[in-house]
Image (cartoon, rainbow, N blue to C red):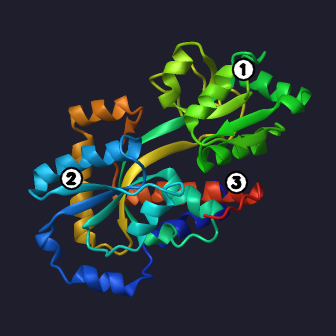
């Protein structure tokens, strides 16, 4: 790790805690943090009911309610690639009563690609990462490739057939990172959702795509072919699948995540109370089993640890977006 990269990462960690909204701090200080919570807590899921962020909010929310003796209400606010719900929480009072069930895209990816967003990483206080999940590199069965090396060679020999798809900007950035690390001349095609991407892979409309473990049934059923996983180590659901590093692509470890965050400047006593409780909840066997059903690897880390992950990911994905010249309108 270079000293320049290390310094930039630490700068982002510090930025997560900077004061930039004095009026929200005043609102938070109006209530004694030692009495928290004294009324219902809202966890915003910036996606429709039934999705991963909604499930995470409900699993964590129910256990928080059991412990605190206060209702925890899940508030679904989908729209604009999670921007609607995320922006709502960014500008909510920093009092611990409005939290966000946040994916990587909300906190890190969107600020990297939407320059006119009305929020940024500085507008949130990380509480705890609930779970993580890797990106898997998959190809259509009709492609004559059986390894990452063969895929790279194939795209260079047949650039007219070298396309990739994704349902969100996160998958676009993964594709761009792959292109930057390998030189593969891949054209990215946006789809409305990952279900459409899966269909396109099965039909041969797409050559390749990064997918998540939620596509495991299609991979295990032989409908699409997985080549590697973009994770630091092999994953339990596909133990024979090599990592991209093992497959010869250096510096290609990228893991997505789901976590709970609060508006910036939420009092430290409240953050610590929520952090301790969420870590305890994530360790519960029934919660771990339910998270794994969502293909999430349970984590449950501290606010400081989560902040470091966010800082590192911000550096990575901002650099990828800049190198690929990706700048979108929200």
Disc 1 target residue: 147
- Give me the residue at 38% from left, 67% from top: 89
Q: Secondary structure at mark 3?
A: helix
Q: Earlier in the sequence, mark 3 or mark 1?
A: 1
Residue identifier under label 2: 277
Q: Which residue is mark 3?
A: 320
Up/down of 87 relative to 53, above or below: below
What separation in Å lies between label 3 and label 1 (alpha carbons)?
24 Å
Is 127 left or right of 175, judged from the image as shown?
A: left
Let me know if residue 286 appears in the view. yes
Q: Position of residue 218 (x, y in %)?
A: 54, 20
Q: Is residue 80 left or right of residue 227?
A: left
- Residue 147: image location, x then y, percent: 72, 20
Q: Is residue 146 above or below residue 152?
A: above
Mark with earlier residue (2, 1): 1
Q: Position of residue 128 (x, y in %)?
A: 34, 54
Residue 45 place in picture, x, y as percent:
37, 53
């Amino acid at each position: 790790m270079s000293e320049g990269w290390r310094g930039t990462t630490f700068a982002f960690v510090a930025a997560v805690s900077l004061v930039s909204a004095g009026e929200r701090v005043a609102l938070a200080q109006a209530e004694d943090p030692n009495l928290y919570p004294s009324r219902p807590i809202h966890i915003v899921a910036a996606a429709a009911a039934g999705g991963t962020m909604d499930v995470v909010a409900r699993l964590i929310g129910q256990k928080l309610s059991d412990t605190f003796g206060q209702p925890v209400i899940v508030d679904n606010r989908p729209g604009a690639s999670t921007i609607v719900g995320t922006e709502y929480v960014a500008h909510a009072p920093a009092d611990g009563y409005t939290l966000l069930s946040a994916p990587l895209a909300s906190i890190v990816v969107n600020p990297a690609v939407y320059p006119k967003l009305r929020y940024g990483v500085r507008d949130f206080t990380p509480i705890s990462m609930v779970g993580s999940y890797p990106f898997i590199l998959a190809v259509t069965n009709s492609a004559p490739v059986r390894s990452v090396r063969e895929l790279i060679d194939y795209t260079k020999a047949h650039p007219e057939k070298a396309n990739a798809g994704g349902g969100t900007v996160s998958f676009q950035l993964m594709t761009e990172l792959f292109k930057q690390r390998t030189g593969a001349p891949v054209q990215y095609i946006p789809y409305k959702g990952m279900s459409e991407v899966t269909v396109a892979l099965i039909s041969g409309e797409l050559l390749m795509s990064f997918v998540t473990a939620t596509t495991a049934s299609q991979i295990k059923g032989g409908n699409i072919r997985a080549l590697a996983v973009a994770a630091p180590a092999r994953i339990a659901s596909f133990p024979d699948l090599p990592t991209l590093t093992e497959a010869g692509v250096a510096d290609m470890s990228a893991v997505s995540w789901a976590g709970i965050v609060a508006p910036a400047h939420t009092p430290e006593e409240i953050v610590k109370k929520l952090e301790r409780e969420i870590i305890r909840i994530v360790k519960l066997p029934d919660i771990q089993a339910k998270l794994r059903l969502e293909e999430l690897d349970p984590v449950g880390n501290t606010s400081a640890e989560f902040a470091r992950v966010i800082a590192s990911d911000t550096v990575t994905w901002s650099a990828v977006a800049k190198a690929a010249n990706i700048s979108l309108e929200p």
